[in-house]
Image: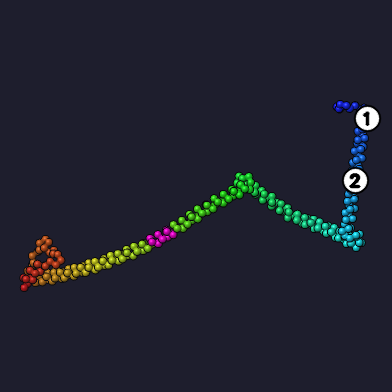
Amino acid sequence: MEVAPGQEVAPNGRVEEERSALVAVAESRGTRSVTNMSKNADMLDVDLEEEFRKLCGGHPEPMILQVCNRLERAIKDMEVLVIAEVAKAIRLDTRAELQWSRESAIIQRWVEVVLQSLESESRTEENGALLETARCQRSELEELREAKRQLEQRELELQQLRAAMDTQGASRIVGTEAKNSVKYRRGADVLKILRSESKATDETKAFQGSHRGALRATAPRDGQRPTQPGHGAGRRTLGEPDYNSERYGGERE
């Protein structure tokens, strides 16, 4: 311990006595301060009570005190009832609270999974990623609608083309049938002509045959034998005159 200049060093016993005296003085001062504080509080309560009595108009009557006591009991009873109802509600809503807690945990887990899948760290980034995804999906939906519209237009054009081809095919079939009917009529006419010519030829041949038979029957009676015609003399074409018959007819005359 350093000593200031001009001060004397006191013996150790004296120093200890001074320290104990200082501690006793401090303790007595602390006790007095606490006692004074309690006295001040009591005086404050008394002052407040006196002030209340002054405001209420003098000393309280017994009936007023009874009313206050009843009101205090009613307040306490109401407090007990409220606490009981709250405890009852808590006991009854335990399952609902547990279910709500589980659902909240599941939702929180879903949010975490979505955040991890979108590679985002906050709700703001998640919302931005979701908006971008929704925008891409809307653009894809518009493209699909446009492709569907083009496909429907092409199907309509194809149906119109098929209808036109069917109409042209029907007209071609009608024209072919008309041409075939004309050909059939022409063939029938030609066949009729051929049949008439064949019939005339057959009648001519029959007439010539009957005429030759008559000549052969009359030749031995006259005693004259006709000369044998040369090779090819008996042939004649249709409409060529028979010279032998004319000659024989002249001789017969």
Asked whether 194 or 165 is in front, the reply is: 165
Which residue is nearer to you in this view: 145 or 56? Answer: 56
Where, by quadrant of the figure, is residue 233 drawn?
A: bottom left
Three-letter code, disc 2: Asn
In the image, which residues are magenta?
155-165
Q: How crowded is mark 2: few (under 14 residues within 10 Å), some or many (20 or more)?
A: few
Residue toward you, 79 or 221: 79
**Does residue 113 appear in this view?**
no
| Amino acid type, label 1 | Arg
- What secondary structure is marked by label 1? helix
Residue 106, position as x, y percentages in the image: 67, 50
Q: Where is residue 71 in the image (x, y as percent from the top left)?
A: 86, 60
Q: Does the magenta stretch include residue 204?
A: no
With 89 as the anchor, is 11 left or right in this view? right
Task: Look at 86% across and 26% down and name the residue there.
Answer: 5
Which residue is identified by label 1? 14
Could you say which quadrant of the image residue 16 lies in? top right
- Is any part of residue 53 visible from this angle? yes
Residue at 8%, 65% in the rendered image:
227
Residue with the mark numbered 2: 36
Outermost residue, bottom side = 253
